[in-house]
Amino acid sequence: MRNRKTAEVLERFSKKRLAAEAAAEARCLEVYAAVPEIKEIDKKLRTTAVNILAIASSGVDVDEKMAALRAETDAIRAERERLLEAAGYPAGYTDIKYECPVCGDTGYVGTKVCDCLRREVAAAALEDSGLGSLAKTQSFDNFDLSYYSGEARETVAHAFRTLKDFAENFDGGEQKSFLLVGASGLGKTHLSTAVAKTVIDRGYRVVYNTIDRIIDDFQAERFRDLMTYDELADTYFDCDLLVVDDLGCEMQNQFSVNCVYNIINTRLNSGKATIINSNLTSEELRRFYYDRITSRLFGEFHVLVFKGEDIRRKKLQNR
């Protein structure tokens, strides 16, 4: 499954919390063997919650009794620290040492995702997405409009603003989809990668793949090789954002056409966002695909046209 790395992060969080607690328990047992008095003190401290409940339930002199209980507990803890230090142990030796003290390695602060889990899931999600090294070099911040001029600059600048706004406001609900068309080397892949990375950083699941590889996955499922239907659906139908690169470069046959239609139709019907890149013009796409596909692409996708000269060639010339 393409969300394997993300699942590994969640499993690792569960294990490291348990490991931290087990390590603290082992240190406690070590200390108890060396200083039995500390074990008795810990027994007393564990009754604090019961005592608090009893005081609150009594309804009599609650504030005064709570203050007395806090003072007694503080004194017991101070004695515990004195005994621990006298036996040669550092302060807090038996405390649980979580990697993240904010969430205690649960990954959550209340019902909100902790920053530590968000960072790790985002990093794993980049691997799961299929973006690979693209995410390291292509972002909104390093997209350079100076390579474009005239009308081309205006159309690409519009695409940049539109996609950046889409990515930064992505909320996982019903979203619009985009069709990016234009010749190779005009920035379609750069901007769709920037969208994918931004949406991943916001905590949503993204899958990025070329149309050839997507069809290969459907073909593998057809012959029950490598992928099951549930894995296929989880990957291409259920992710929050699907980015399809190089539409129109695949070998066309009835099976590939059905795959393309199935993906487009299923995601549109479920309100899932899709970004499709194609080096073909709108006219070429209409000739390449049946009307049932092009009517969906041009009727329900927001079309962004890329114009200008090959940016990759310009960058090579400037080196």
Image (cartoon, helix red, strand yellow):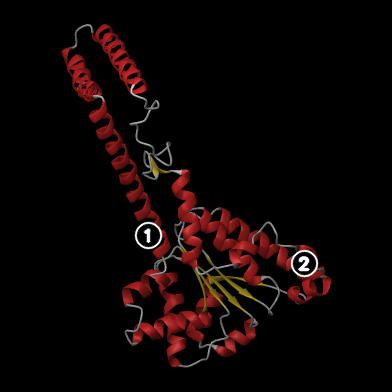
User: What residue is shown with label 2?
Assistant: 153
- Observer-nearest residue: 38 or 297? 38
Front tag of 2 and 1 = 1
Q: Is residue 138 visible?
A: no
Name the residue: 62% across, 58% down.
164
Name the residue: 38% across, 37% down.
97
Q: How many marks?
A: 2
Q: Residue 129, percent across and down?
A: 49, 66
Q: Is residue 10 left or right of residue 69?
A: right
Above or below: residue 211 compared with residue 177: below
Above or below: residue 222 compared with residue 93: below
Q: Residue 49, percent across and down?
A: 22, 23
Amino acid on which disc 1 is placed: Ala
Q: Residue 25, percent across and down?
A: 27, 37
Residue 7's mark? Answer: 1
* Number of residues whose C-alpha sits closer than 10 Å to that of mark 2, classed few (under 14), some (14–19) or many (20 or more): some
Callout 2: SS: helix
* Number of residues whose C-alpha sits closer than 10 Å to that of mark 1, classed few (under 14), some (14–19) or many (20 or more): some
- Observer-nearest residue: 155 or 319? 319
Q: Quadrant of the C terminus?
A: bottom right
Amino acid on which disc 2 is placed: Arg
Q: Quadrant of the N terminus?
A: bottom left
Callout 1: SS: helix
Q: Is residue 263 left or right of residue 139?
A: left
- Observer-nearest residue: 136 or 145? 136
